[in-house]
Image: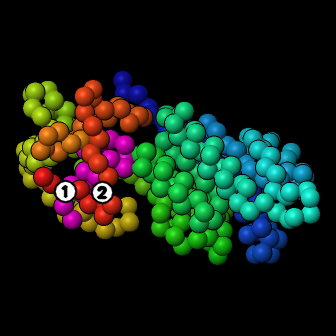
Amino acid sequence: MSQLVVEDVALFFDFENIFISLRKQGGQKPNFKKIMTWFSQFGRIVLARAYADWASHDKFLAPLQSNDFDPVYVTTYTGNGQGALKNACDMQIAVEATAVSFNRPHISTYGLLTGDKDYLPLVNHLRSMGKRVIVLAVADSASVFLKKAVDLFVPYGEMLVQVDGRSLPVIPQRDPAFDLLVNALEQLKSEGKEPVLARVKLQMDKISGGFDPKAHKRADGTHYARFITFVKEGMRLGLVQLVQQEKDILVVLVEKGTNKLPAGTQPFPTWPSGRMPLN
C-alpha cells in the first residue's frame, strides 16, 4: 500500500504589514480563520507564528490564538521618545525562519504573510534550500520584486474569494524532469559510474529517449539555456550539488532535507558572474 505524503507548512505572519495594508483599503481586519483555512490546502500546518508589538494590538490576541497562531512579541518602539524601531519584525522573522529551515528540515513549504521587499534575502535563502515559498499579501501594498521572487503570490482579496468559494489555489508542482535527473544519478551509482556532468545528460537521454533542457521551464516561465542551468535549478531545489573533482564536474545527489555531500568531495565554487565554467 502506498503511503500518503503530506507536506509540512510553516507560517510567518508580519501582522502589522498586513493590518496596516488592509486598513488603508477601508478598514478591513485580517481574518485569521480564513488565512489558516487557505494555507491548510498546501499541507499540514506545523508552525504558525504572528509577529507584532502586541501591546498595541492586544485585542487581536484572543482570536489569533484561537485560530492556532502563536503570537511573538516584538518591540517596535524604543520607549525613550525616539520613535519606531525600523524593520524590527522583518529581522525577527528572518532570523527565526532561517533557524527553522536548518533545525526542522521536514518543513518543505513556507508561508509568508507580508508584502515587504525586505524579505527578499529570506525568500532567496529558503528557495536555495529547496523550500517552496508562498506569499499572501495585500496586492496594492506588495513589492513587485517579492511577487516575482516567490513560488506563488496570492493577493489577500483573492484568498478570501477562494476560501468562500472553496476554490483551491493552484499549487506549483516540481517539474518531473527533476525526478528523471534523480533517476539517472541513481542508475549511474548502481552501475558504479562517476556522475560526470556530460554522462548524466547522456543517461537522462537514454532513459527518456532524448532530454532537451530547452524544452523545460523555470517557475518564472523562462527556458533553461543549457543542461548545466537545469542542474543548477536542481541544486536550488536541494536535490543535487555540483562538485569539482580534478578537471571534471560531478553531479552528486544530496541527502534529502540536508546539504550533505559524499566524503572527500568539495562543493563547486561560486563564481562572481553566476556562471560555472565547464572545464
Q: Dot 2: what SS? A: loop
Compared across the picture, whether 109 is left or right of 275 comes to: right
Q: Is residue 266 visible?
A: yes
The stretch of residues the image draws in magenta is: 225-242
Out of 118 and 145, give the one closest to the viewer: 118
Binning the other alpha carbons within 10 Å of mark 2 as few (below 14), some (14 to 19) or many (20 upward) gives few
Residue 89 image offset from top left, x and y in percent: 72, 54
Residue under the point 54% across and 33% down: 104
As displayed, is residue 157 above or below residue 233? below
As displayed, is residue 107 above or below residue 20? above
Residue 153 image offset from top left, x and y in percent: 53, 63
Residue 63 image offset from top left, x and y in percent: 83, 47
Out of 186 and 55, give the one closest to the viewer: 55
Residue under the point 35% across and 32% down: 260
Binning the other alpha carbons within 10 Å of mark 1 as few (below 14), some (14 to 19) or many (20 upward) gives few
Q: Disc 2 or 1, which lies upstream in sequence?
A: 2
Which residue was labeled with disc 2? 271
Q: Is residue 150 magenta?
A: no
Residue under the point 43% across and 45% down: 129
Q: Are marks 2 and 1 in contact (CB under 8 Å)?
A: yes
Q: Is residue 234 magenta?
A: yes
**Amino acid marked by disc 2:** Trp
Q: Dot 1: what SS? A: loop
Marking on residue 277: 1
As displayed, is residue 110 above or below residue 256? below
Residue 226 image offset from top left, x and y in percent: 18, 61
**Amino acid marked by disc 1:** Pro
State how far apart marks 2 and 1 are (Cα). 9 Å
